[in-house]
Amino acid sequence: MLLMHGWSGWWQQLSVYVEPLVAAGFRVVAWDAPSHGESAPGRYGRHYSSIADVMDATAVVADYLGAVEAIVAHSAGSMAAGVAIATGLVSPKRVVFVSPSVTGDDHIAYLTQHLGWGPRTARLVQHYADRRHGVRMADYNVPQLIADSTCDLPEALFVYDADDYEVPTDSAARLAEHWPGAQVVVTHGFDHFRVLWAPQTIQHAVDFLAGKAVSPTPAVRSR
C-alpha cells in the first residue's frame, strides 16, 4: 500500500490514513517525492521537481517493495499514480484518488488564473518547463492515457470536494468517464486539502480498499 502526497506536499499529509489502514490489515508505506519533505533533491536540484520525477520515484519505490496492492494519492500525486498505472509502471488492485489533478493543462490554467498570467506568459512558462524538464504539460492527460491504455486497470474510488479551489471540480468525473467501474464521492465544504483529512473520506478509503461497499451519501462539513 502506497500513500502519495501532492505537489509541494509531504508524507505526513496522509499520516491520518496509516493507523486505520494498518488496522484493516495493510502494510502501509508513505514516502516523500524528490525535492519534497525529507527526500533528497530530484534530478534538477533543490526546490525543483516534476511529474516525471515523481513517476520515476514511484517506480523505484514499487520495485523496492515488490507488488503494490493499493494506492491512496492526493492531488498531483493522483496524476503521477494515474500515469504510472496507464503506462504499466505499477499495477495495483485498488486505488483511491482524493482531489485528483488529472491534466497538465488544468495546472497551467490554475496558475494563469491565480497569478494573473496572460497567454504569452503561459506559453513562456510551458516552453521553459519543456526545455528544462523535458515535460510538456499537455502530455499529462490522465483521462486520455487511461482511455488509451492496454494495461489492466485497478478498481478506483475518486473523492473530491465541491468547494475545491485548486483543481476543476469536474476532474474526478472526467477521469471516471474513462475508468470503467470507477466510483465518485462528492463532499461539500472541505476544499482541496481538508477533504483529505475528513473522517468521512478516510472511512470511505479504508472501506473501499478493504473491499467493503462505499456509501454514495455525500459528506458535508459543519461550518
Image (spheres, rainbow, N blue to C red):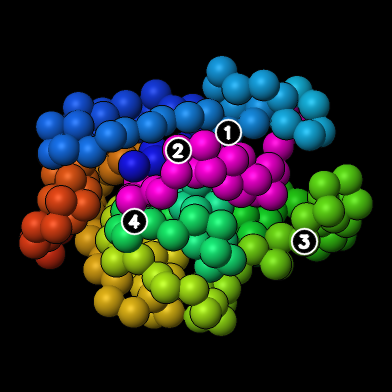
Looking at the image, tell me whether mark 1 or mark 2 is earlier in sequence order: 1
Which comes sooner in the sequence, label 3 or label 4?
4
Dot 1: element: loop
**Residue at position x 68%, y 56% in the image:** 108
- Give the camera-side residue of 139 and 67: 67
Q: Where is residue 190? Give x, y as percent.
A: 28, 43
> Which percent across, then down, holds residue 74?
42, 45
Horizontal and vertical percent position of residue 49:
71, 37
> Which residue range is magenta in the image?
47-72
Disc 1 versus disc 3: nearer the observer: 1
Number of the label disc, if any, that sits on residue 136: 3
Q: Disc 2 marks which residue?
A: 65
Magenta stretch contains residue 63: yes
Q: Nearer the viewer, residue 131 or 86?
A: 86
User: As displayed, is residue 173 above or below residue 78?
Assistant: below
Comes first in the chain, label 1 or label 4: 1
Q: What amino acid is labelled 1 in the image?
A: Ala
What is the x, y in percent for residue 101?
Answer: 50, 56
Asked whether residue 202 appears in the rendered view, the answer is yes
Nearest-to-viewer mark from 2 and 4: 2
Which of disc 4 and disc 2 is earlier in sequence? Answer: 2
Judge depth for marks 2 and 3 and give the one in front.
2
201 drawn magenta = no
Horizontal side, residue 3 vs residue 161: left or right:
right
- The kind of residue tagged 3 is Arg
Q: 10 Å neighbourhood of mark 1: few (<14), some, or many (≥20)? A: many
Which mark is drawn over residue 67? none
Q: Residue at x 71, y 60 (%)?
A: 137
**Residue situated furthest top in the rendering:** 38
